[in-house]
Image (tube, helix red, strand yellow):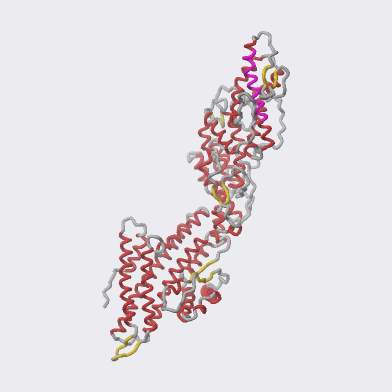
Amino acid sequence: MQDIKLMLINMGTTYFLVDQETLMYKRNGNISISGLTPEMFESATDPILECSNLYKVISSTINKWKEMCDNSIIKAFIFSASNILDDYERSIYAVSNESLLSLVDRLSLITPRLQLLANICCIKTRDCIVIPDHVPCGIKLLNTIYGYLLERRFSNDLFLKMLLYIFESCCLAYFKLLSNWVLKGVLNNEETGMFIQVKPDIEDEDTSSRRNWDRFIINENIEVPIFLNKYKNDILNCGKTINFFKKFNDLNVFLPNLICCFDAVDTQKAYEQFSTYFKYDPDLRAINCVKRMSNCYLYESIVGPNYSKDNTDSHHNKNEIITNVIDHKIYLDSENYELFQMPDWTSVDNIYDFNKPYGFFSDYNDSLKYNGNCFDVINMIDYIPHSILIPARIQKSVCDKKILDMYFVQENLMVHLYYLSQCFFLMNWAFSSKLCTTLFDGIVTNRQQPSNIFNPVKLKSIVDDAIQDSFPRYELHNLTLEMTFIPGLNGIIDISDIECIELNYTPEWPMNMILSNKILLKYRRIFLFANKLEFVSWSLSKAREILNVYKNDTGLQFRKINLFKHWMNQFVSSIQQYYKQVVISTCWSELNENFENVKNYDDLFACHKQYMHTMLKRCLMVVGLKDKLILLNKIYIEILAYYQALVSGQFYLKNSERLHSEFISMEQSFFRFLKLREMFYASVLKTVQTHGNHHAVQLESLITILGPLNNNFT
């Protein structure tokens, strides 16, 4: 019996042989036991040899993996499997030496569990011992264990305790890997099994821009534990938030130990523990203070709204500090086991306890208990992801609040955006008047020498002077006027004269995370819309100055020229009213309302992005409304043609009547203007009347402001 026990734990044998080819234990053919026939002896020793060979190949495989592996999940598996094998050895030595049949009976319980352990390791045990050459992928191994758990999901299954012990060890190792990302915002692409990666085309200079936020992606080619698959985006966004937060503020990176959540009791403990460690301090002071988080939606969504809130609240006293944290050691680099120390078998029961790695080979009569209830594997599947999601979401929630504080309080985001709207949208009268008047006058007076106005020095001085007149405290304004192309300026005054000019802005960190390049492009497009409108309005004001010189004249032709200007000015004023009231004012109010509901940086960026998109849509600068923008542009061209004819010709008296040398050109431009205005109105009205059209709401206001169409010119 002593020799058999040594063989069962692979410590050598006297009475049996090791086959040199198969490396398996076998009978030597020279042993007989009094009272047993050869057939009975063979029948008794078959299960002993099977168990001995299983243990030998499993322990040899585990020892080989120890030398080859640096994967944390595999290390956790090795640690848990080693503890299970230790318990196997204790179980063997706990059997009395006097009874061979008692040992064989005991092995009938032990061998199937060793076989399951061998199956998890993908070990083939038939005919010969073959140790796998390659260490399996950690995620694949975790999913394999998960699959066996589903097969053995009944609480009275004899395999369940062993599977849970291995699964919990591997899960904690994987969660530890994920915690570097979801709790610290640190991503190591060298780490095997990490499904979040950095886009390879991101340059170093992009790490402090909006591209930095989008550079983290999910690599769909990397396997993810099945139970976490649907939470991949949550995990991605948690890490992105922490990574972003660390760029403008120090983050307390001390992390409490993770726990494996198997039921609602565990999630409660996890929430209490992590909501204490990860705290929200709106003043960004007292880093180590304990402050209860104001929002408990996370805990309630996991545990359920019917859970006693009085019981929950008692654990969140703001002066309470968790000081007693159990350290779950996942694996050891050099294990030192007391192989033959017997546990107190009276304490081995059907209660699952991660800290008692023995009793895996006992024959339980009752269901496996956990937190006082029968263990429910299906229920466990729903709770396991929250082992990492609870601390991740709490940490993200804290950082989300601090990020919003940073933008709205420290960086005065609303003041910053209001300043940009005043400049880009030409809503500040002093700024737009100075900027546009200087620019437009320069374009008109330097038509033969465009370089006098279209040069970086001149354009910079125009912006600097406009800022100084309207925003004197914004000396370092980061605004520039730039040319997209150089116009000829040799022909007539045209809308293209200012289409070459755009206003640019270079935001600094962290404002560049809100004002991305794509968002700033939208700002430039709105500036172009506003600048064109200002140019046309400016030309009509110049026309009024010219006509005022002859305001006492009452000739028919002069009266018509004034009416041309009046009709055109009325249309332009309507567009200006629509732009200021519906586009600028309404959109700004909507932005303020939406900002009140933002909960994180993503919401903040999305609200501002939607704000700019709505402005573009109301300025007819989106697909589906481009035909109206083209018509509006053609109307502007005819107004400028009218002004060009007015300034290029001259008034003269004939038969006491004031006439103009370019009257025919002005009249032709005006009638084209009327036709285009009618087409524009009809196009907008058709869009408004189209049932279910998503642009109708915005354009109804434009129809109202334009008023009823009247083309009866008298």
Q: Does the magenta stretch include residue 35?
A: no
Magenta-tinted stretch: 41-60
Q: Relative to the observer, which residue lies in front, 183 or 136?
A: 136
Q: Does 213 sit above or below residue 256?
A: below
Q: In this view, does 638 lie to the left or right of 439?
A: left
The N terminus lies in which quarter of the figure? top right
Q: Which quarter of the figure is the C terminus placed in?
A: bottom left
Q: List the single residue furthest toward the bottom.
A: 655
Secondary structure, magenta segment, majority class: helix
Is 42 contained in the magenta span? yes
Residue 594 horizontal/vertical position (percent): 46, 57
Between 655 and 171, the residue placed more toward the observer is 655
- Rendering coords of residue 45 (x, y %): 64, 16
Q: Tell me where residue 98 sits by quadrant.
A: top right
Classify residue 510 by image quadrant. Answer: bottom right
Image vertical order of residue 422 relative to residue 83, above or below: below
Q: In this view, does 676 lie to the left or right of 294?
A: left
What count of labels does the image hold?
0
In the foreground, 405 or 313: 405
Q: Where is residue 605 in the image (x, y as percent from the top left)?
A: 50, 57
Work out whether residue 118 can be spotted: yes
The answer to whether residue 465 of the structure is visible from this angle is: no
Residue at 48 percent across and 68 percent down: it is 424
Residue that sits furthest to the right in the current view: 14
| Residue in the image at 51% along x and 41% along y | 302
| Above or below, 669 relative to 186 | below
Q: Residue at x 31, y 79 (%)?
A: 667
* Position in image of residue 490 (x %, y %): 45, 79
Left or right: where 191 falls relative to 612: right
Which residue extends farthest front? 21
